[in-house]
Amino acid sequence: MQPHAVIFDIGNVLIEWQPERFYDAEIGEARRRAMFAAVDLHGMNDEVDRGADFRETIYATAERHPEFRDEIRMWHDRWIELAQPVIPQSLRLMQALQARGVPVFALTNFGIGSFEVARGHYPFLEAFDRAFVSGHMGVIKPEPEIYAMVEAETGLAPERLIFTDDRAENLAAAAARGWQTHHFTGPAGWARRLVAAELLDDREAA
């Protein structure tokens, strides 16, 4: 069944999200490993993605771990350096779909404050037909509620949605509701899937 709308995850689909890489470059791999072992930084980020205050959540975590205070604060103060660069072919695919008139949505685990920072740095984040941002929704992938909210807001049947994400658990939750899914491991495979779905041709997907 041909999809009626395409849904992109953002992190590691349209923009690289590699906090470990940032910290390896800044403080060295050994100290980064020690910090990530001592502090649940991804859990902290999940709180932000659920709608907690961006700065307050990160700074409070930093105060609970004074041995890593300065490094943890970088998660807020230098956040855009953790979320870069753009994945160019993915962005071209998004734009090609929209040029064809295909509705393109985002479904992303992203905080309210961090998404505002990202929008200021990446103007294309304003171009989605609708961006479903977990911080504003109060729920994160892969919890079933977030997918139900997308269905309700778009009014589209699950089988008419095609969704790409880099995390298998997020895709499994979507597929359980009947969404078409694609595991994003790089833009070339996503391009082939969109051509197979007859949403783009080879030239548009290049």
Image (spheres, rainbow, N blue to C red):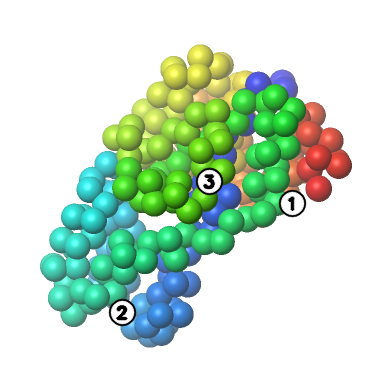
Task: Indicate the position of residue 79 as horizontal and vertical percent values.
Answer: 38, 62
- Residue 21 visible, this angle: yes
From what the image shows, is residue 137 above or below residue 10?
Answer: above
Q: Is residue 90 left or right of residue 51?
A: right
Mark closer to the observer (2, 3): 3
Q: Quadrant of residue 60?
A: bottom left
- Give whichever of discs 3 and 1 has the lower sequence position: 3
What residue does disc 1 label?
188
What residue does disc 3 label?
123
Mark closer to the observer (3, 1): 3
Callout 3 environment at 10 Å: few (<14), some (14 to 19), or many (20+)?
few
Q: Is residue 74 left or right of residue 193?
A: left
Q: Secondary structure at mark 1?
A: helix
The residue under the point 70% across, 45% down is 92
Circle 1: residue type: Ala
From what the image shows, is residue 58 above or below residue 69?
Answer: above
Task: Indicate the position of residue 48 as horizontal and vertical percent values.
Answer: 29, 49
Q: Quadrant of residue 7?
A: top right
Q: Quadrant of residue 65?
A: bottom left
From what the image shows, is residue 73 above or below residue 172?
Answer: below
Measure the C-alpha gap from mark 1 to mark 2. 35 Å
Callout 1 environment at 10 Å: few (<14), some (14 to 19), or many (20+)?
some
What residue does disc 2 label?
34
- Give whichever of discs 2 and 3 has the lower sequence position: 2
Quadrant (top left/top right/bottom left/bottom right) for the N terminus:
top right
Depth check, front residue: 204 or 169: 204
The residue under the point 31% across, 69% down is 74
Measure the C-alpha gap from mark 3 to mark 1. 23 Å
